[in-house]
Image (cartoon, coloured by chain):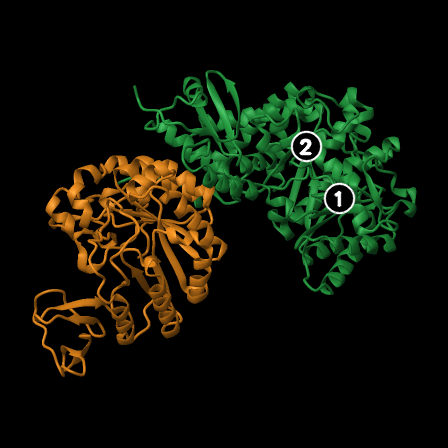
Amino acid sequence: MPLARIQLRDGHPKALQSEIPSLLLDGSGVPVSEHDVVLLEPDGRAIVLYQAEAKSNALFLTSRCNARCIMCPQPSQGEADGAPLEMALRILDLITTPPLALGITGGEPTVRWKDLCVVVGRIREKFPETNIEVLSNGMRFRDYALVRELAEIGGDRLVIGVPLYGACDSVHDEIVGVPGAFWATLDGLCNLERAGVYVELRNVLQQTTVRDLPDWAEFVARYIPFIGHVALMGLEPTGQVNFRLEELAPAFDARSTVLTSAIRTFRRAGIPARIFNLPLCQIPSSLWSFAEQSISEWKRSYPEECVQCSVRDKCGGIFASWSSFGEQVSPILLLPENLQCHPC
Amino acid sequence: MPITSPYQLLPFRFERENGRALLVNEAGQYHLLAEEVFDDYVSKRLPRTSPQYRELKSRFFLVDFHLTSAIEHLANAYRTKKRFLWDFTTLHMLVITRRCNQSCTYCHASSAAEDAGPVLDMSVETLHCCIESILRSPSKALKIEFQGGEPTLRFDLVEEAVRYAGEANAKLDIPKSLEFVLCTNLVVFTPRMLDFVARHGIHLSTSLDGPEEIHDAQRPSRSGCSSHARFKENLGIAVARLGPGRVGALLTITPRNLHRLRDVVDEYVALGLHSIFLRPLNPFGRASEGMSDLGYTTEAFAEAYSDVLDYIISLNRQGMHFPEVYTTLLLSRILTPFSTGFVDLQSPAGVGIGGVIYDTTGDVFVSDEGRMLFYATGDREFLMGNIHRSSWMELFGSQRLRDLIAKSTLESSPTCAWCVFQSYCGSDPVRAYQLHGTVTPFVPATEFCKRQKTIFRDIFRRLEDADEKLLDIFWSWVTARDLHEIAVLDVTLA
């Protein structure tokens, strides 16, 4: 498998791999740094699979999924999976310094259960201090035996990121495209709690979820208050989303109102909550201390206008893919008096 | 005509008032509906696409296709609310002595004179027996409360109790977590006592009925001199050394202070206390003898409570963190999914299974009120046994106790099963027996119920009209945090 780790030799990044003693990468594409891991395609492209300097990296386990979320950024096309497990294990072999965290994603990782267990086990073994963040819709965790199995392998490093899109099945199931998904996910969440696994509860801010957000926040605080923290994520215009952008993209005002309401609910209940993937100019300043600079460098951008913004260095920018849609940012010209930004 | 799908109602209780309905579900979550919507909801006419349908569904008031799942998660929530039952009896009160150096007009404990002699004190042997029994409680965390009379009259017994409990606890396979509370009038509080209390992490629970003239009129020393000055001095010393978090005070409301509760609150603040516990008069002990002198109507109480709560809230709005403890308890039940054990107001009642009291003689009663009844009338109705003669099972596993508990469960009480406030309320069978001759009276006719309902309605009115700051204040009480840790502040642009 043509994976290579980037190693610096004499100031020029080279791929270190036994068959090919050196590789010259030209200036196009994503810049690479030392200790990155790349996949070398026969046509000469190098695809970066792991960035040593990035805040987070993810291992792709499968493109298959047991759901059909309408805003899926990586919709399954039913294609054969290739060999993602081997790829993941090979990447792990090539990583030199233990990362702070490693994500496991897909598709839905739990549909390849044995592979998931192997990868989690390998990370635990090789990097015992690394957080293992599995992104999952939580439905398969309805089976408590599976939860116990994964919990034992992952130990206290395991974090499961589970999205819940609504406070009732009417909202959630319609978004996920699977009848019964809401209750299955809820069961999964309860089982994760029983097994002592840390859960990040996620929601993606699109029109339907925005409409339901205040009820959703109350539901979480009332019926699943045991979750570790809440992640409220801005919409990313990729994959499925692009076909239905007008339907999905929420109005900024409506979103701001419900964000304030939801954050209030969580603050009062003592549940930590963070806002991801939104620039500071799109949310009320009272919520800036909850915003994370979360968009990966390689897919983030700061439009031209941002150069005038007084809080640019505290802001995470926008998804680069939004640039084609215009009117995303409005630079903050005046600095608020008691500005509190999350220390990123 | 919108499509209506068949849905099922999940169990709930409700009340209609002023064109709107207050609903409470099985997990204790409430919801308000305009009356027309309520009628549609119960008649199953609510369209599936309506926001009200979604709201009711997300609050477990209705379900369509997944009844079993809904019930399982509702059951989870219900179990969470009743978690206090798992720990069984966690509050154990020891009557160190029946003697007292004060002579409070409403004395709950019918306490005896200071010089009545040690026969009214607990013997060391009895003390040891009680502690051994207490440590047999299945709970992992126990609270041992020293009561009386006035426990400081035999502080040596308090010291012995703490010492012996620590020693016996250490010998257990799984030692318990022990918390001690000293209930004292703080009239006599020597440096030695303070030192002991400080070193052993003991909490103080005391009484302050108001500014000097009120406090002294209701709580005179037996010697006749003012107790307020001594109290104030000792309280100051205690708070300075222990911190306000370890000193709590409660108030007994009588006609004398009923209309001056704002002054009482000011006195609490002035003396460095950080909370108040508004407790209405208990019709036991000396109180019931002089009922005509000491009584006030439920309406008068409710009005005064509401007024002082307004005042307390205004202090909080100005930045002071000052909860009212009883309101905080009720708010915790209304606003959070979590369990709150409060032996005087829970279902099933806390008698015996939540808290228990051990008299100087070794007699064990289901509650302090049960002990008072015995002193006043000789009625042994609430006597569980005696520590010297009864085994642990005979005390805590008796048929008699089980019957009492079964009768004190609101969920199965004919009068309370339908009450909208059931999830937040509780049962007091000893009071019922004392006032009405039975542990299962017709509750809605009791002053207790009328008062509870008035308080609940007051709280719900406040919640309905609350601005964000008031909600933050309530949550600061419920979660014991300062306002600035909760509030999502508006940031002004320069």
Quarter residue B307 falls in: top right
Type of the residue with mark 2 = Ser
**Residue beneath disc 2:** B427
Q: Residue furthest top?
A: B18
The mark found on residue B356 in the picture is 1
Quarter residue B371 falls in: top right
> Is the residue at mark 2 from the same chain as the one at mark 1?
yes
Q: How would you rate the neighbour count of disc 1 (Cα within 10 Å): few for under 14, some for 14-19, many for 20 or more?
A: many
Q: Would residue B270 be found to the left or right of residue A26 on screen? A: right
Name the image quarter holding the C terminus of chain B. top left
Say what secondary structure mark 1 lies in.
Answer: strand
Residue A261 in view (yes/no): no
The green-coloured chain is labelled B
The colour with which the image depicts chain A is orange
* Camera-nearest residue between B269 and B250: B250
Residue at (38, 36) in percent of width and height: A215
